[in-house]
Every structure is written in structure tokens, then in C-alpha cells.
């Protein structure tokens, strides 16, 4: 009888102890319990496996091919596929595996009391200051001075005060016109219905005031201003190749395809279709450019080569504050 | 025994006291609506941009010094090109996976800004910019416009023919800023176009460090402010009110969904980068200031500026022999600044016009704000038509509509179409809302009838 009681007591204690060992089941849940979804788990496993296959494919392609024969499409499919499959796995996890609880809570609002306290702290902190305005004014001036001093080195970026660089041109009277290979351009080689790009001999070609667009037109059709009467020997015209609108190269020479509307050929910039009339000395017929294309006077030397007979008719390149001032064409 | 969850949590909290914060973050609520994904796509494209961009910097040489190309791309073999261009071509042909990274980076930039533009429209048309979220709206606008500059610098760095033409236009637009344009642009470029060699270092550091850093800070601010006032939500049920937000907690429900979206976004970008060619710089060839090609188009997000530059009639505003406003200023500077200013001022303008100063946590359906929706559509169509005109030369090639005719049509159309759209859209919104109200009335009446019948039946 006694033995039986002991046995019962031990069993009860054991049960109690076991219950104490699992306290979590008594805790209130935060995330509600969901039902197991073995199908979704299998799907996730499948996506993980596919990710591994695609990633291995990427490694293989990357290792197998050399740079010049690398199939970029295959690389993209492999890495993109691996990412898409991993994304698929996470989508299944999100939509079917983890518990989706739609909860609600209050939107955060304003804190009028704290606002007041902040104001109060700031106001009360200045109780020792008597000349508030003077101090604030002097402080602002000091900060401004330090700021100006700190920012001043930015002036080293470029010639901020001296805009003379915008007015430089490598062209001067007698300078030979050469092509991209530095070979002189012979007047006799300049044909009608096409255009040539010319440069000043021995000067940097990428200089914005260097490049010329050269064409030959019927001299009888020229309507240049009287001062430019001698600027186009044998109808050969030279203009700055840089558009006066936004600085692109005048890359198009439009021949009249429909004479009733477009009786003459024209020089066109392909960026915004500013269109210039070579016959009248580069005036704008069309498009957004606000200034004519600067013209370069030409002459033909005793060898039959083209030379500059002076400098451009105006400053070269896109417009700015001083672009219409009389050019000085400084030298470097 | 090691508990893989409890031990790290305990470790972190004992050293940072962050457990309450972590718990709060885990139970932060995300309202669930498909249109809220757009902003996330922006964030994930940004991550792809950073990752691919870092890879590119390991190979790219930011220098315009001349060199001779020798390599697997035979049409260019022996040509004089810049270091920048050569290294970008080498990235495409001589670096394993380099082309994939380059193209994915470019696609990611296009998607980044496209998703941002769509996110902006979503926020605009649902009125999600209203109090208390005006700061989030402003930061978002700053993000968009900074990203435009970032994208422009990115494709300008490569020094191919297209990028050089774009840079020349940037130079022209810079010069066109009244009075200070000349000195300012000279300072940035260091010398007249194409600028000093240092200009390439300046562009490079701006593109790979300064602006990305700024974008990261702005994105961080944008998201912190969203978290501070919580996301807006649509009135999907009686539970969704101005005072209570309904949504999925960050953990567990939202986290796997967001990771999935990150991976899908990256997957699409890398698939695009692998399968669809973008900016084949070896075909454009190297840039020189005297070269330009017809049919050049910038990346899509600059199309509106090209369109505006092209639409302007030919004139400069002059004062004596000084040029106060050179032509590119209108389309290249004033137009985008005007669009930015209108969008930035809109929350305050709307408050003034409607007198509505309340806090709004519920997003509008566009039809329920007919004036805003109508204005938004009109304004958007104005920008969009200008954008379309940026491709007028392509339209001519595709459909034979002459450039002159298009210019004439668009110069009128960009003013008439938005005006018409304003009234049409407002009317449509009002009709839709009237129909909604009618339906609601009908339902209410039906419910009342059903109730009465139920009461009658209960009475008998």
C-alpha cells in the first residue's frame, strides 16, 4: 500500500516536472499558429534546387568560355534565372509558408506636449544672453566668413573670372586648312554637293574653335553680305562646325530633296535640327539656334591650297552672356 | 546548449539595448497594395546599380588621354580613341562578364528612373503627398532630379560618339544660364568644350561617389520619414480609416515578399542585361568635337529635355550686345526647373485651393479628386508631348511625317491637348464618382428594404 502511494507520488511529480519543462506552450502567442503546408515546402525546395542549377550554370559558362567568345545571353539567363528562382522560393515562403496576419494599429500622430517642451527648452536656455540680436548677427557673419573661406578653393576649378578662353580661336590670316590627317586641303579637291571637315594646321583639332565645315556652291547663287564678298573664292565656303545653339557638330549637309519648299541646300545640326543657310553667310533658316554660324574667310594660296584669310565673323560656339561682343580672338 | 535564435538576440540586446526597437521594426505594418511596389522597385534597382557600378569602376579608366585600340573588336582595331572609350569597349569584349555588368547597369538606370516616375504618378494621383507627407514628396522629387543628372553623367563618361554629343549639349545648356552661365560652365569644364583632362576626373567622382552618396542619404531620409508617419492606405474596408493602419507586419509576412521582389527586380535587370543589347558603344565609335551623327537619341529619361530644346523657336534674348537668355536655357534649364517647381509646390497649392489642411492617411481614388486628377493628366500630357517631340526625327523616319509638319503640330498641340484633357478628365472623374454614389445609394436602399422585409417576416 505504502509502495503504491510512493509510486503515485513519483508519477505525479514526474508529470508536474514535465509540464514545467515545456513552459512555452503556456505563453501567449504573438504570431498566430498556421497549418503546415508540405506542398509549399516542396515547392520552395524545388526553387532552391533550380537556383543552384542556374548558379552552377553561371559558374560553368563563366569558367568555360574566354572573354571574347563569352555568350552574354547565357550568362544573363543563368544569373537572372538563379535570381528569379530564389525570388520564386521567397514568394512561396511569403505567400504560403509564413503566417500572413493582417493587423491594425493607430497611425502615429502629433505630440503637442513635446512640441511645447522643445520650445520651452530652447527659450529657457538663453536666459543668460542679454544682447541676443548682436550675438546672432555676429555669429551669422562669422559662419558666413568661414563658409566663404571654405568654399573659395572651388574657384581653382576653372577660369571663373576670365572668360577669355571662350573667345580664343586658333585661326589667323594665312593659316593653312588641313584635313584630319594634317594634309592640306586643295581648293580643286573641294567638290559640290558634299562637305569636308577642316582644321587649322598644327593646332589642336578638338579645340571648339578649330573645326570647319567646308562646302562648294555655285558662286552665282551666293548672297553674302558685301563685306564678305571675297570670303568664298570659287564658291568655297567655310563655317565653324560647332552649332551656335548647343555646341554639337554641324554633321549634316542637306541637299534639296523637294525644291518647292527647300530650294537651297543647308547646313544642319543633328542634335536639335538648327538649320543654317550657307549662301547668306550662315544665317538661321530654321530650328532653335539664335545666332548665325560664324563664317571663316578663305583664300587660295599659290599651291592651290585653302588658307584662312582672317578670323571668324563672330565668336564661336553656344551662346552665353558675352557671345555677341566684338570678338578679340585672343591667343593662348 | 546553443540556441541559434535566442543567443544572438540576447547578445545584441545586452550590448545595444535594441530589443524594443527590433520588436517594433518587426511588427511595423505595411499596407498591401500592388501600386506600393513601385517605390520598392526603385530601391532594388538602386541596389543593382550600386553593385554593378562598383564592378565597372574596377575596370573603367576615367581619362580622355588618347590611345590606340587593339583588341578583339576588329572594326576599331588601330583607331585612336580615348582611354575612357577603350576601357569601356574592353569591358564589353575583353573582361569576362563585363558586358553583362555594363548592360545590366545601363538597364538598371533606365528602370530606376522609370519606376521612380511611375511611383511619383502613383503618389500624385492618390494624393499621398498631402499632410503629413509633404517632406517625403519633396525628398522624392529631389531624388528624381538628382537621378536624372546621375544618369546623364553615367552615359557621358563613356566618351563614345553619343555621349560626346550629349556632353556638348550639356556644355551649351550650361553656358546658356543668364549672366553666370559662361564663368560657371568654364569652371566646371576647366576650359572651353571639350574641357580640361581634369573634367573627366570631376565627372567620374561625381558619378561614382558624390551623387550616389547623396542618393543614398536621400533614400534613407525618404524611407525614415515614411516609417515615421507610416504608409498611406486605400479605403478597402471599414477597418481602413484615417486613424488606423491595416497591413502585414515586417516579420514574418512582409520580409520574404520584399526579398522576393528584390530578387525578381534583379533577375529582370540581369536578364535584360544579358538578352537585350543596350548602348552598343563600339558601333557608335569614339567621339571628337567635330563629329555628330543623325538620329541620335539620349536615354529615355532625357527625351523631354531634347524635345523642349528642339521645340523652341529661334531667338536669343539680348540686351545691347549682351545675350541675356541664350536659347537652350528655355528647354534645357527653365523647363525642367519649372516642372520641378510645379510639382514641389503642388501640395501647398492644393491646400490653398481646397482649404483642406487636415491630416490624410487614406489615399484617394483618382476619381474622387477630379480637379487634381485633371490637372495631373493635363500637366503630364504637356511634359509627355514635349517628350514625344524629342523623337520627332525618329517619327519622321518611321511614318514619314515631315519634321516641319510635326514642329508646327506640336507647337500648337502641347498647349491645346492638355487644356482639352483637363476638361475631359475632370468630367470623366465626376461621372465616375456620380456613378459610384448612385451605386452606394442603391446598395443602401437595398439593404434597407431587405432589413424591413426581414423585420416584417419576423413580425408575422
Image (cartoon, grey):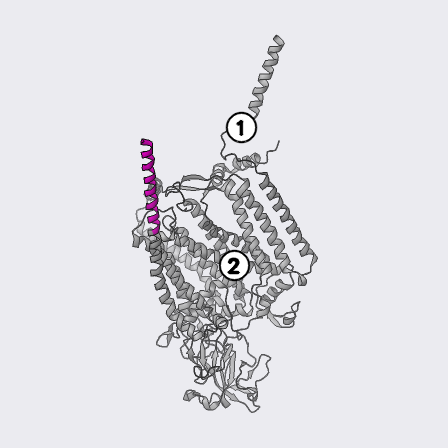
Any part of residue A41 in sight: yes
Q: Position of residue A25 (x, y in %)?
A: 53, 28
Most extreme residue toward the front is B460
Magenta span of residues: B435-460
User: Which chain does tag 2 point to?
Assistant: B
The residue closer to the viewer here, A214 or A270, is A270
Q: Count up the numbered dots.
A: 2
A243 within the magenta span: no
Q: Secondary structure at mark 2?
A: helix
B451 within the magenta span: yes
Q: Position of residue B274 (x, y in %)?
A: 60, 59
Relative side of A286 to A306, left or right: left
Reading the image, the residue beneath label 1 is: A25
Quote the CA–CA distance across marks 1 and 2. 51 Å
Question: Magenta span: helix, strand or loop, mainly?
Answer: helix
Give residue B109's mark.
2
Instruction: Please determine if labels 1 and 2 lie on a single subunit.
Output: no
**In the depicted structure, whether residue A78 falls above or below residue A165:** above
Q: Secondary structure at mark 1?
A: helix
Amino acid at each position: 500500500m505504502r509502495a503504491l502511494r510512493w509510486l503515485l507520488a513519483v508519477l505525479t511529480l514526474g508529470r508536474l516536472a514535465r509540464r514545467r519543462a515545456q513552459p512555452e506552450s503556456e505563453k501567449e502567442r504573438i504570431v498566430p499558429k498556421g497549418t503546415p503546408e508540405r506542398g509549399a515546402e516542396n515547392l520552395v525546395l524545388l526553387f532552391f534546387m533550380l537556383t543552384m542549377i542556374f548558379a552552377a550554370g553561371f559558374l560553368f559558362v563563366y569558367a568555360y568560355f574566354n572573354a571574347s567568345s563569352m555568350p552574354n545571353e547565357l550568362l544573363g539567363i543563368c544569373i537572372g534565372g538563379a535570381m528569379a528562382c530564389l525570388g520564386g522560393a521567397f514568394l512561396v515562403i511569403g505567400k504560403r509558408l509564413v503566417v500572413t496576419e493582417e493587423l491594425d494599429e493607430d497611425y502615429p500622430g502629433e505630440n503637442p506636449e513635446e512640441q511645447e517642451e522643445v520650445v520651452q527648452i530652447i527659450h529657457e536656455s538663453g536666459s543668460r544672453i542679454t544682447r541676443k540680436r548682436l550675438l546672432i548677427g555676429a555669429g551669422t557673419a562669422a559662419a558666413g566668413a568661414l563658409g566663404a573661406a571654405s568654399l573659395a578653393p572651388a574657384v581653382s576649378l576653372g577660369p571663373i573670372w576670365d572668360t577669355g578662353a571662350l573667345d580664343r580661336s586658333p585661326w589667323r590670316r594665312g593659316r593653312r586648312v588641313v584635313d584630319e590627317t594634317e594634309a592640306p586641303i586643295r581648293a580643286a579637291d573641294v567638290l559640290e554637293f558634299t562637305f569636308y571637315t577642316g582644321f587649322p594646321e598644327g593646332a589642336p583639332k578638338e579645340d571648339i574653335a578649330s573645326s570647319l565645315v567646308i562646302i562648294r556652291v555655285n558662286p552665282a547663287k551666293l548672297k553674302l553680305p558685301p563685306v564678305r564678298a571675297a570670303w568664298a573664292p570659287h564658291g568655297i565656303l567655310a563655317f565653324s562646325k560647332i552649332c551656335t545653339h548647343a555646341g554639337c557638330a554641324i554633321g549634316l549637309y542637306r541637299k534639296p530633296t523637294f525644291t518647292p519648299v527647300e530650294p537651297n541646300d543647308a547646313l544642319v545640326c543633328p542634335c536639335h535640327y538648327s538649320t543654317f543657310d550657307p549662301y547668306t553667310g550662315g544665317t538661321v533658316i530654321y530650328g532653335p539656334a539664335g545666332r548665325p554660324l560664324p563664317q571663316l574667310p578663305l583664300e587660295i594660296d599659290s599651291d592651290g591650297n585653302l588658307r584662312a584669310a582672317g578670323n571668324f565673323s563672330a565668336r564661336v560656339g553656344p551662346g552665353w552672356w558675352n557671345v555677341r561682343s566684338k570678338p578679340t580672338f585672343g591667343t593662348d | 546548449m546553443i540556441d541559434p535564435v535566442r543567443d544572438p538576440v540576447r547578445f545584441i540586446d545586452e550590448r545595444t539595448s535594441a530589443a524594443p526597437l527590433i520588436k517594433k521594426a518587426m511588427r511595423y505594418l505595411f499596407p498591401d497594395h500592388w501600386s506600393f511596389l513601385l517605390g520598392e522597385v526603385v530601391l532594388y534597382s538602386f541596389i543593382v546599380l550600386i553593385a554593378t557600378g562598383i564592378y565597372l569602376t574596377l575596370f573603367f579608366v576615367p581619362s580622355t588621354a588618347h590611345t590606340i585600340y587593339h583588341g578583339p573588336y576588329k572594326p576599331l582595331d588601330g583607331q585612336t580613341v580615348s582611354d575612357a572609350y577603350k576601357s569601356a569597349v574592353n569591358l564589353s569584349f575583353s573582361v569576362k562578364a563585363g558586358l553583362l555588368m555594363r548592360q545590366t547597369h545601363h538597364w538598371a538606370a533606365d528602370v530606376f528612373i522609370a519606376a521612380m516616375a511611375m511611383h511619383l504618378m502613383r503618389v500624385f494621383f492618390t494624393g499621398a503627398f498631402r499632410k503629413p507627407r509633404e517632406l517625403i514628396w519633396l525628398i522624392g522629387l529631389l531624388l528624381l532630379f538628382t537621378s536624372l543628372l546621375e544618369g546623364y553623367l553615367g552615359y557621358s563618361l563613356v566618351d563614345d560618339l553619343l555621349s560626346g554629343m550629349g556632353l556638348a549639349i550639356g556644355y551649351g545648356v550650361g553656358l546658356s544660364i543668364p549672366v553666370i552661365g559662361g564663368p560657371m560652365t568654364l569652371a566646371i569644364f576647366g576650359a572651353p568644350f571639350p574641357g580640361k583632362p581634369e573634367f573627366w576626373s570631376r565627372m567620374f567622382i561625381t558619378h561614382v561617389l558624390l551623387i550616389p552618396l547623396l542618393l543614398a542619404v536621400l533614400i534613407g531620409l525618404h524611407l525614415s520619414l515614411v516609417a515615421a508617419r507610416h504608409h498611406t492606405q486605400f479605403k478597402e474596408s471599414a477597418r481602413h480609416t484615417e486613424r488606423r493602419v491595416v497591413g502585414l507586419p515586417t516579420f514574418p509576412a512582409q520580409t520574404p515578399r520584399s526579398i522576393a521582389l528584390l530578387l525578381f527586380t534583379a533577375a529582370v535587370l540581369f536578364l535584360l542585361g544579358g538578352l537585350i543589347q543596350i548602348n552598343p558603344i563600339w558601333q557608335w565609335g569614339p567621339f571628337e568635337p567635330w563629329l555628330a551623327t543623325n538620329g541620335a537619341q539620349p536615354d529615355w529619361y532625357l527625351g523631354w529635355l531634347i524635345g523642349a530644346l528642339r521645340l523652341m523657336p529661334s531667338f536669343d534674348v539680348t540686351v545691347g550686345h549682351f545675350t541675356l537668355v541664350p536659347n537652350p536655357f528655355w528647354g534645357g534649364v527653365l523647363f525642367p526647373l519649372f516642372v520641378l517647381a510645379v510639382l514641389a509646390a503642388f501640395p501647398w497649392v492644393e491646400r490653398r485651393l481646397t482649404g483642406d489642411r487636415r491630416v490624410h492617411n487614406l489615399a484617394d481614388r483618382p476619381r474622387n479628386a477630379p480637379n487634381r486628377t485633371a490637372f495631373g493628366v493635363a500637366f503630364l500630357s504637356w511634359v509627355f508631348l514635349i517628350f514625344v517631340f524629342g523623337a520627332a526625327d525618329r517619327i519622321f523616319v518611321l511614318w514619314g511625317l515631315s519634321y516641319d509638319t510635326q514642329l508646327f503640330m506640336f507647337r500648337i498641340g502641347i498647349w491645346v491637348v492638355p487644356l482639352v484633357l483637363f476638361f475631359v478628365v475632370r468630367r470623366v472623374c465626376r461621372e465616375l464618382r456620380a456613378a459610384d454614389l448612385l451605386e452606394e445609394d442603391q446598395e443602401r436602399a437595398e439593404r434597407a428594404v431587405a432589413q424591413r422585409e426581414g423585420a416584417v417576416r419576423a413580425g408575422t
